[in-house]
Image (cartoon, grey):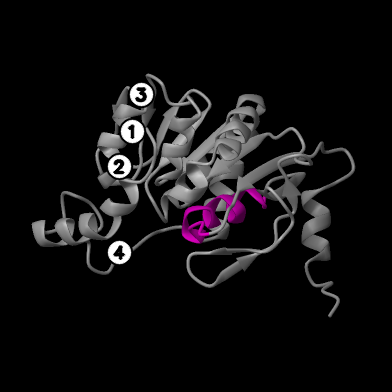
Amino acid sequence: MKITSYDGMLAALAPESVRPFHVGILIGPGFVPMDIIGVQTVLAMMPGSQIHFIWKTHDVVEGFRSWPTVPTATFDTCPELDVFAVGMNPPEVQNDPAVIAFTRQAAGQARYVIGVCNGVALLGAAGLIEGRTVASNFAAEELLLKLGAGKILSSGSGAAVDGSLYTAGPGIGSFEVALLVAADAFGREAGELAEFAIEYDPHPPFRTGTVATATPQMMQAARDMIGPIIAQYHH
């Protein structure tokens, strides 16, 4: 099926006079889609945006769970990026020396670096959070300190911006860092318009989404769920 209904909007986003705005999102087997969907959604709305899903090959990788995704660029073919972004990937991916090396290279060339949830740990493994202020998953604080983070924002504090490094907790954090990057790259009005276009205005039904509002039992259940995974990341 040929889709033409978006043609007008796409043409408006990429007039001939606008230079490409390359956004690279690292994916690998087991990547967590919710940690990158905000980056894709918001930055795809920016002028000249070109979104690249990056992995070693063009073979389909399955996000967690049942989210098959076709990489559009490889480590060897990825263009120089304006934005390099990574969400949570499993330890098998994040501990891979080739992944760490590519992360260091791609992030070193990018204007903006985004880490969401335990994607921040990959940035740490690549030596990119040394002495920096970051936000991430509440259960990863000890790991991030071992990886050199200077300060970790408390759960519920929102995104952390430290120079060109934008980090956030899981899920909706990807929208927040992407909106901040959009505003810095294209002006506040662009960020505000994107926020309104997607009607980003969270209303958590239970208000248990931070350390301050969760019960001790919830926190322990979450640690039991994610702790064994975090323990497998190299540091």
Q: Residue at x 16, y 55 (%)?
A: 213
Which mark is drawn over residue 140? 2
- For the residues marked 4 and 3, what is the alpha-carbon distance in whole angstroms? 32 Å
- For the residues marked 4 and 2, what is the alpha-carbon distance in whole angstroms? 23 Å
Q: Residue at x 56, y 50 (%)?
A: 39
Q: At which x and y percent is residue 190?
A: 61, 43
Residue identified by numbered label 1 = 144
Residue identified by numbered label 3 = 148
Mark 1 vs mark 4: give the one in front: 1
- For the residues marked 1 and 4, what is the alpha-carbon distance in whole angstroms? 27 Å
Residue identified by numbered label 4 = 204
First in sequence, mark 2 or 3: give its number: 2
* Residue 144 on the magenta segment: no
Say whether marks 1 and 4 touch (CB < 8 Å). no
First in sequence, mark 4 or 2: give its number: 2
Mark 4 vs mark 3: give the one in front: 3
Q: Amino acid at mark 3?
A: Gly
- For the residues marked 2 and 3, what is the alpha-carbon distance in whole angstroms? 13 Å
Magenta-tinted stretch:
30-45
Q: Amino acid at mark 1?
A: Leu
Magenta region, mostly helix, strand or loop? helix
* Residue 32 on the magenta segment: yes
Q: Give left or right: position of 200 versus 79.
A: left
- For the residues marked 3 and 1, what is the alpha-carbon distance in whole angstroms? 6 Å
- For the residues marked 2 and 1, what is the alpha-carbon distance in whole angstroms? 6 Å
- The quarter of the rendered structure image containing the C terminus is top left
Q: Secondary structure at mark 4?
A: loop
Say whether marks 2 and 3 touch (CB < 8 Å). no
First in sequence, mark 4 or 3: give its number: 3
Disc 3: CA contacts within 10 A as few (<14), some (14-19) or many (>=20)? some
